[in-house]
Amino acid sequence: MNSRNMPGAHCFLNNYNFDMIVSSIEERNSIVKKVEIEDFARIKKLSDPVVSPSGKKLAVTVTEGNVEKNTYKTDIWVYDEAHSPAFFRLTASENGKAPCFLDENTILFPGDRLNAHPAKDGTVYTVYNSISLNGGEASEFMVLPFAASGLFPLSDDCFLVQGSVNLSLPDFASMDEEEKKAALAAWEEEKDYSVFDELPFWFNGRGVINKLRAGLFLVSRTAGTQEKLTDTYFDLHGFSVNAEKTKVIYWGNEFETLNPQKSRMFIRDLNDGSVTEVKLEKRYNVSGAVFCGEQIVFLGSTGETYGSSENPKFYLCHDDGSFDLLAEPDPSLGGVGSDIAGGGSVLFGSDGIYFVQTVGYHSVFRHMDLNGNIETLIDDINIVNSAAGTDPVYFIGMEKDRPQEVYMKKDGAVTKLSCFNEEYVNEHEIAETKHFTFIDADGVEIDGWVLYPADFDAEKKYPAILDVHGGPQAAYGEGFFHEMQYWAGLGYIVFFCNPRGSSGKGGAFADIYGDNYGVRDYNDLMEFTDQVLARVPQIDQDRVAMTGGSYGGFMANWIVGHTDRFAAIASQRSISNYLSKCLTTDIGYYHNLSAIQADPWSSPEKMWKHSPLAYADKAKTPTLFIQSDEDYRCWMADAVQMLQALLMHGVPARMCLFHGENHELSRSGKPKHRIRRLKEITEWFDKYAKNKE
């Protein structure tokens, strides 16, 4: 669906220069450009939508890359229908992000804009700034002596804050000067070491987290106090406050050495301080909770059916800590994948539960009442893990083959509020995804897509690329993928699908664990490739490449040892050896053991059987490895092992190792690194597939 033809669609953002947007098709075609390798930096990424107390104003974070400075600039934009223009840029410092409404006309946001509060004596400070929607500069509002990652105002003076505490740091406040001096000297010396004595000891995107715990704090701004409401070893995952701001529910894990994958959850009365524990009985992993009036609904899974990847169910919680099953909408919560999309909340409550859910290959916005009845509110635009407000509903979404914009649904009509990426869309030739389905050998329907070059000629032969998503519980849809559009612009036909293991079709569809790992999914991908080659005879079958990252990297390594049908493979942030992966990565000790349903001691043969490295001696396909040295989700040991194995067996192979990057390289890595990554992959495919003799 094209927004320019959508009934009721309007664009209120009017402080961009649209001189390049031409009125006639002929003029537009004369200036149209192909999608370039650096264009991810031009496309605005939208995230963190929040509404004002009245629900009439919306604030979002807008992120744009700066290739020359090799960084990203972020600023807060506000939508206010009563303002002219209705959508306006609030901050101009290029580091405004994660907005929070203090009141109807004041926004708080984190960032030490003047570098006035550097870390000292092991203490990391978080500065919150305030800025008025009526104009003026941002000013320092509050400084907290810990790394804060979430703020909720209870009043102008009192706040609930999620903050990180380092348990290995000495308690300097309780020491006299001599003791503090000695402790500081000892601590300074220890900074050269990392001590690991718990699991997980590192985490992707956060680095070493040994003895770090997130806690819930009650903060008084005027008194300068921070009361920690959670216990010492409790690691806070999230919290939610009722509309009256008299109760908070919070959840997380509590551990001293081994982080269990079962949650504890508490309800605290903010008036009298009384606490009630929800009776989870060490069975449930909580992934979210919200107040609906005075009722509490939480998302929980036991893992007793599909292991660590089991879809959560909705439960209604009672005042005494007991709860009942409310509903189980089996398809996964959250949105479809994209390499240029920002995130935000997928769950909130008021007169019921509002949530984003992937159904098939489309992410929709739904409402559920407290009887478990579910109604779909928005299903014509892919919602990108972000939604806020109830009347009206604001959300960030992607129309078919288009980058993100901000939308509003009010009085039954959807209105497009922003034009952040409209200029880019009008300047570029964007290829269209063509959807089709097929029935696999087991009688299961699989969704797939083909992305044709914009200047596709049915009389020509083309090279092609199979792109496999991560997860495996993730889903491709019909939003905008920069890397695919770039390859289409270079003359590749790109094809991709949601094989079994993907999200969106329920737990049974996603169940590839144990003996089916690398079997059901691999068979679907090979059948899909056969389907595409039969449907698109313009593809040169001798010039087909394949790539994937994370689980897609597992599949790349698996494919290279099981078939030589591809001319080239690019394996990104990959998995090759489950015997090592389960003992080195942040999620290995629980998620990977669950996925394979084996462990290195009782069933090492099974783990090896499902490890791509076991089949590396059969490999023939030239393979490129893309890896980051701070990727603790798929650590570089697996890519290194696979690289060495291929080289030992005479297979053309190469690795590009990115320093200082993590698992999110392709989505949020430094701009120059993202360019080099895509350049490496494209040149590898050009050499061994596109220009193959």
Image (spheres, rainbow, N blue to C red):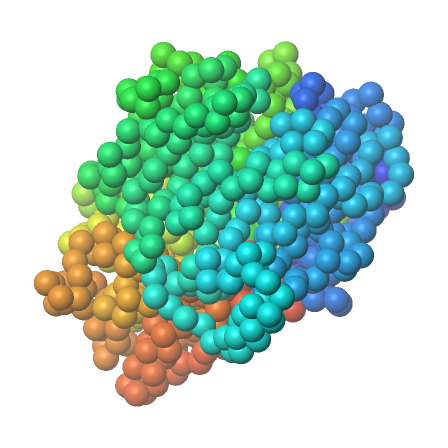
Q: Position of residue 33 (x, y in %)?
A: 72, 55
Please name the residue shown 72% across and 43% down the image.
142
Nearer to me, 590 or 120: 120
User: Is residue 163 depicted above or below 71 in this figure?
Assistant: above
Number of numbered callouts drawn: 0
Nearer to me, 660 or 392: 660
In this rendering, would 504 be left or right of 283?
right
Nearer to me, 187 or 57: 187
Q: Position of residue 635 (x, y in %)?
A: 39, 68
Q: Is residue 350 visible?
A: yes
Residue 432: which quarter of the image?
Answer: top right
Nearer to me, 225 or 658: 225
User: Is residue 18 depicted above or below 414 in this figure?
Assistant: below
Q: Position of residue 363 (x, y in %)?
A: 47, 33
Quadrant position of the C terminus in the picture: bottom left
Please name the residue shown 75% across and 24% down the image.
104
In this rendering, would 181 be left or right of 685?
right
In this rendering, would 192 be left or right of 55?
left
Please name the residue shown 28% across and 32% down the image.
280
Q: Is residue 489 visible?
A: no
User: Is residue 380 depicted above or below 676 in this figure?
Assistant: above
Please name the residue shown 30% across and 87% down the image.
648
Residue 525: which quarter of the image?
Answer: bottom left
* Residue furthest out toward the left: 602
Q: Position of residue 1 (x, y in %)?
A: 59, 31
